[in-house]
């Protein structure tokens, strides 16, 4: 594959696919994005992205990369009424494993932007459509790949006009959790990738609401499950005073799929003012439920050989427990890894890209896995020794974080993917945590 003289095809116009296309546009003569849906001109959920009906947020690292790829886009969102969480500690309520992290504001250099998923996709899609070498084609269903000599040479698809046979120098599978690359690898004579899994057995129910702006000062409410209470909730204030409201259960605990049932599901742990705001809110949609059996990381970075002309990006590589809000940011760091790999040319591109992407993915994966293990215990299935060792300490750590502003700020940088988890494993952090626990006379939260 020679840059500036080639054609790249991206399969899927979700966030992973759109960001991949943006990166490729700097290196390819032409980029074609294919999606099976009729892509809407307005910001609304669509069938091919069922999770768009549920709550989303753009963590600081994701916002930083979005702004790098599309300068000025975050300011455009601000003019459209998209909330931004900065330094005001009253704008976010965060309860981690039963501990209220009061004052958990990201700070002036780590803004959290909260566009709805449809708003974010629409903004990115419109920016891409303005690029002269990018063609976004909707209502195109991918049927398979074209191969020659063990290399991927194009795509077979079906559009409203009939069958399509498109040549390509590079194909990027951004089909999300429905990625077909494992099957395509077998067709090419390669093994499927190894898979790391965390069994979550999660279900979440969500709807959109309009809530009186005076009823909630918060712009975001995150309450995680705990060891003795396998359920939680997440509220995100988006543009137009619209809120995404999600309630979830893990370990087989299933929330109801009607509004009255959802409110009853959270009544025993939701803060009183939050519950009152929800009860007086105006539903804008009917509740939708979605299951999430496992977090899965396909370890393409460990494969000894990978077919030339093919890459995978987004949830097809790593899909995480959605209750932590990391998904769009993890897609963005994979796109950044692709940009890094392409700067060094296209020789051995797949190996270099997958290994570069594995580093930030590992940070998000380990953070989520420790939290899941702390709540679910052995029910997560077998996990690496470091995760098993750290999970029992999570309750004590969050007890310390809840009562120490410095620890809280360090943890938030890690949680928002602005700093690696290793930054927490320092002597000063350990001493502060121990001192906080001794001072407070720590006892587990359950």
Image (tube, grey):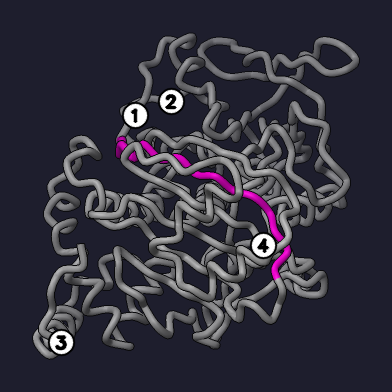
Q: Does residue 24 appear to the left or right of 441 in the view shown?
A: right
Disc nearer the start of the sequence (3/4): 4
Q: Earlier in the sequence, mark 3 or mark 1?
A: 1
Q: Residue at x 25, y 72 (%)?
A: 398
Numbered disc in front, either 4 or 2: 4
**Is 192 situated above or below 4?**
above
Q: CA distance from mark 1 to mark 4?
A: 42 Å
Q: Main secondary structure of the magenta part?
A: strand
Q: Measuring 60% from the left and 35% from the top, which residue is drawn there?
A: 174
Nearest to N terminus: mark 1 or mark 4? 4
Residue labelled with disc 3: 440
Pointer 1 residue: 303
Q: Are marks 2 and 1 in contact (CB under 8 Å)?
A: yes
Look at the image and give the residue range highlighted in magenta.
197-211
**Residue 418 is covered by the magenta coloring:** no
**Sequence-wise first label, 4 or 2:** 4
* Mark 4 and mark 2: Cα distance apart in space: 43 Å
Q: Position of residue 364 (x, y in %)?
A: 38, 55
Which residue matches tag 2? 306
Q: Nearer the viewer, mark 2 or mark 3?
A: 3
Q: Is the residue marked by circle 3 packed among few (<14), some (14-19), or many (20+) residues within 10 Å?
A: few
Q: Residues within 10 Å of mark 2 (few under 14, many from 20)?
A: many
Report how far apart the C-alphas of labels 2 and 3 lie in the structure: 53 Å
Frontmost of labels 3 and 1 is: 3
Q: Is residue 3 above or below residue 227?
A: above
- Can you tell which quarter of the image residue 72 is in? bottom right
The image position of residue 419, as x and y in percent, is 38, 70
Which dot marks residue 243?
A: 4
């Amino acid at each position: 594959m020679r840059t500036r003289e080639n054609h790249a095809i991206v399969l899927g116009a979700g966030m992973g696919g759109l960001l991949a296309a943006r990166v490729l546009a700097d290196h390819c003569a032409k980029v074609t994005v294919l999606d099976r849906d009729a892509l809407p001109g307005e910001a609304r959920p669509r069938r091919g992205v069922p999770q768009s009906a549920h709550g989303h947020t753009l963590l600081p690292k994701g916002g930083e990369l979005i702004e790098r790829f599309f300068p000025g886009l975050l300011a455009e969102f601000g003019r459209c009424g998209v909330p931004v969480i900065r330094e005001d500690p009253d704008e976010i309520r965060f309860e981690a494993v039963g501990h209220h992290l009061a004052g958990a504001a990201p700070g002036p250099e780590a803004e959290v932007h909260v566009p709805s998923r449809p708003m974010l996709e629409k903004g990115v899609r419109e920016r891409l459509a303005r690029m002269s070498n990018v063609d976004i084609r909707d209502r195109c269903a991918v049927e398979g790949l074209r191969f020659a000599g063990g290399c991927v040479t194009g795509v077979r698809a079906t559009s409203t006009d009939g069958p399509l046979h498109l040549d390509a120098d590079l194909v990027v599978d951004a089909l999300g959790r429905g990625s077909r690359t494992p099957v395509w690898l077998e067709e090419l004579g390669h093994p499927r990738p190894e898979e790391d899994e965390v069994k979550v057995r999660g279900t979440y129910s969500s709807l959109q609401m309009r809530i009186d702006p005076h009823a909630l000062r918060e712009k975001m409410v995150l309450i995680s499950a705990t060891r003795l209470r396998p359920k939680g909730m997440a509220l995100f204030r988006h543009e137009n005073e619209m809120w995404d409201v999600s309630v979830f259960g893990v370990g087989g605990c299933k929330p109801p799929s009607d509004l009255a049932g959802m409110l009853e599901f959270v009544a025993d742990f939701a803060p009183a003012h939050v519950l009152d705001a929800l009860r007086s809110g105006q539903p804008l949609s009917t509740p939708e439920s979605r299951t999430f059996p496992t977090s899965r990381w396909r370890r393409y970075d460990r494969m000894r050989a990978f077919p030339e002309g093919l890459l995978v990006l987004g949830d097809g590589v790593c899909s995480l427990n959605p209750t932590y809000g990391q998904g769009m940011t993890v897609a963005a760091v994979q796109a950044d890894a692709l940009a890094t790999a392409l700067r060094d040319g296209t020789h051995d591109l797949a190996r270099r890209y997958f290994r570069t992407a594995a580093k930030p993915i590992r940070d998000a994966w380990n953070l989520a896995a420790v939290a899941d293990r702390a709540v679910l215990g052995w029910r997560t299935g077998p996990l690496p020794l470091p995760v098993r060792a750290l999970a029992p300490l999570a309750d004590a750590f969050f007890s310390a974080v809840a009562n120490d502003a410095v620890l809280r700020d360090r943890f938030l940088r890690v949680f928002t993917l602005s700093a690696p988890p290793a930054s927490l494993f320092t002597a000063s952090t350990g001493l502060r945590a121990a001192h906080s626990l001794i001072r407070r006379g720590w006892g587990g939260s359950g």
